[in-house]
Structure formats: C-alpha cells, structure tokens
Amino acid sequence: MHPLEFPVLGAVGLAVIIYSFSRIMLWLSKASGPLVFVVVAALITVAGFLFASKASVRTSVIAGVCTIATLGLVGTGAVMAIDGERPMHEFPTASNEPSICASPEKTEADKKGSQTVGAKSNVAATIILDADNDLFAQTIGIGATRQITLPRSNPSNIMFRNSSDQTVRLTANLGAFTSTVNGTEITEKPVTCTTLVEPGGRQFLTLVFPKSSPPNGPSSEPYTFTVPGVEGAEVSIVVP
C-alpha cells in the first residue's frame, strides 16, 4: 500500500466507528445511554491496561481483539441505524391556549417547563413580578415602568422573571379583533403565555405584533402583560 493510503484508511475507519457509536447512543434510551457509555469506556480502559501490563503481546492478538471489537461495534451500529432512533416525545407547550393562559393552575404542559434561560443579547424587555406581587417592566435606559413599546412585525424577546413566592405564568394579551363570518360577528382574543415559572425562575416569551395597538390599530382592546391569579398585575404594551 502507498504510505498516503494509511492515514486515509485510518480516517475512514475512525469515521465509521464514530458514526456506528452515535447510532447506538441515539437508539438507546436517555437513561441507559450514559450507562452504556461508561461501560464501554471502562472496557476500553481495562483492555488497554491488560495490553500494557504484558511484557510482550503478539501483534496478531492485538489485531484480532481490535477487529472483533470493531466488527461488533459497526454491526450493532448498522442494526440500530436501520431500526431507527429512539422516539422523541413531543410535549405540549402553553403557547396560545386561552384556557391555559388565563389560569394559574398547573397543566400537562407545565410539567416540562424550563425554569432557566440562556444568555441572549437581544432581550427587548424584562418583565418582573416582585415579592410584593407588583408587575413591572425593565428596559435598557428606562428602568422600571408599567408601559413598554415594542416594534411591529418584528420578533421581540421578552424575559419573565418571577421574584415572588408563587408559581405563576406570564400571559400576553394580544388584543381583541372582530370579524364577520356568514353575517355573524366573531371576536377573537389571541393570547400567548409561558409555562408556570417557579419562584426565582425565568422564561423567555417571543412575541410578534402584526398590527399596531389601539387607537391606531384594529384591536378593540389594549395589548397587555398580565399574571393570572395576581390581581392588578398588568403592564401595558404600545405597538406603533
């Protein structure tokens, strides 16, 4: 073989091993995956120790063990790749269900709700419920306020911070719009909300306002942030 073929074959072999191992890890459940990883790592460590402890080990033995291990890994990975990845269960989110957003009660969606958020530099405002159940907004350069201005048609990232001693959710009330369907007037009141946030927890809520707020927009009701179950907790939203 040409000397250049050795690193190429080595890279191909390594890629096959990595891919096979990844298929195995994706096939396993979330609980058993880390355990299998630890067991495989322990076996590799033990095998390396046994080889290193021998004064001399025949090349054929090392080649045989590595070949058997590689074939077993690749074969298992191929079978599990054909079988498919483990099922990824989708959990409902409390995004725009009026019955959920208007209630402080716990629902199925709240069981998987995160209580922390990653760092983001484009936060439009932080909505805070303090220890006195007072709801207010904080924006850069303005400080605490009960009214914030958000852009129209562009996404706005809102961080909700629960500094109270209750488990609550933040609800964005996006107005009330009346339309006529077959001669009947229908009023829609779109809402969106976070899942329940525990005391000291935080969550993000991304909003897009396609229309201006009253009195310049078609909505008959103002845009507001509220906290269901907390009386008087309200922050007004102005959309130019």
Image (tube, rainbow, N blue to C red):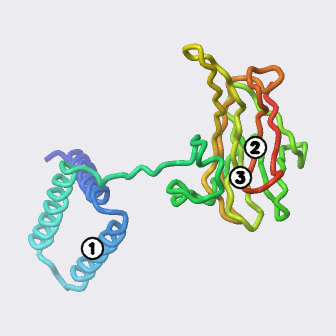
Specify the quadrant of the image occupied by residue 5: top left
34, 93: nearer the viewer: 93
Q: Position of residue 133 (x, y in %)?
A: 82, 60
Label 1 sits on residue: 44
Frontmost of labels 1 and 2 is: 2
Q: Does dot 2 land on a helix, a strand or a loop?
A: strand
Q: Which residue is depicted at the point 63% across and 20% down?
A: 185
Q: Amino acid at mark 2?
A: Phe
Inter-mark Cα distance, 2 to 3: 10 Å
| Total numbered badges shown on the rendered structure | 3
Specify the quadrant of the image occupied by residue 86: bottom left
Residue 228, label in figure:
3
Q: Earlier in the sequence, mark 1 or mark 2?
A: 1
Q: Position of residue 191 (x, y in %)?
A: 65, 38
Q: Earlier in the sequence, mark 1 or mark 3?
A: 1
Inter-mark Cα distance, 1 to 3: 55 Å
Q: Is residue 130 above or below residue 65?
A: above
Q: Which residue is depicted at the point 72% across and 65% down?
A: 166
Q: Could you tell whether 50 is left or right of 126 in the image? A: left
The outermost residue toward the front is: 183
Residue 225, label in figure:
2
Inter-mark Cα distance, 1 to 2: 56 Å
10, 121: nearer the viewer: 121
Q: Amino acid at mark 1?
A: Ile
Q: Position of residue 90 (x, y in %)?
A: 42, 49
